[in-house]
Amino acid sequence: RITVEVATPGEAKAAAEIAVRSLRWTQGWLDTPDFAESDYSMLAANEERSYVDLYMSKRETQRTMLVAKAELGTEPQAAAGAGTWEALFGGSTGSTSSRIVGCVGCEVKCFSRESGLQVDNKFYDGGMQTELRPFMADLAVSRACRGRGVARQLVERLEETVRSWGFK
């Protein structure tokens, strides 16, 4: 069973670990045979800091990061007894009974009505010449959980959150 919740700063590390193994940062660079585990660790540490700063610190506009958690015992291949959580999913535990298997972030950004280009949020004028739009980013799912509807659940919950902020 998968649940989707608002991420806490303590869960940013697990989300970042999944993201660096799931997202293509630069074409081909992460796929080279000499890309070491320490390289992934360095990228994950940088992403963890970015996630906390971007999604979990107080800002003038709405923002959030959601994480998908799989309950222990519901992971793929568990019945066959194959592999550990780390080997199957990457990331670390979200708690003693679940594992983070995916994430998605969203922040509200400001855009010029005339050009459609993004402008700094401080230029938001109440909707006269600028408008606020939710911007989804950092959608990542552990390789072992792909094809099981995790991304769909993350996006559906994010859409609910964005609607609660007043967006259509």
Image (spheres, rainbow, N blue to C red):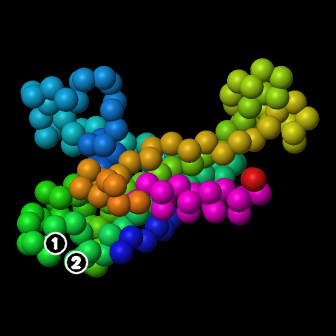
Label 1 residue SS: loop
Q: Residue at x 63, y 61 (%)?
A: 161
At 22% from the left and 66% from the top, the residue drawn is 76
What residue would you read off at disc 2?
A: 73
Image quarter of residue 138: top left
Q: Is residue 106 magenta?
A: no
- Can you say which quadrant of the picture contains the N terminus? bottom left
Q: Name the one closer to the observer, 53 or 90.
A: 90
Please tell me how crowded label 2 is: few (under 14), some (14-19), or many (20+) other residues with Cα within 10 Å.
Answer: few
Relative height, residue 2 to residue 112 (above, below): below
Tally of numbered discs: 2
Q: Is residue 112 left or right of residue 105?
A: right
Q: CA distance from mark 1 to mark 2?
A: 6 Å
Work out whether 120 lies above or below 94.
above
Which image quadrant for residue 31? Answer: top left
Tell me which amino acid carries mark 1: Ala
Q: Residue furthest right?
A: 128
Q: Please tell me whether the stretch drawn in magenta is mainly helix, strand or loop.
A: helix
The residue that label 1 is drawn on is: 78
Locate residue 22: give its quadrant.
top left
**Considering only vertical position in the picture, is 157 above or below 39?**
below
Q: Earlier in the sequence, mark 1 or mark 2?
A: 2
Contact (Cβ within 8 Å) of mark 1 with mark 2: yes
Q: Is residue 78 left or right of residue 148?
A: left
Residue at point 41%, 60% (across, down): 149
Residue 127 percent across, percent down from the top left = 87, 39
Q: Residue furthest front?
A: 147
Circle 2 — which element? loop
Identify the magenta region: 150-166
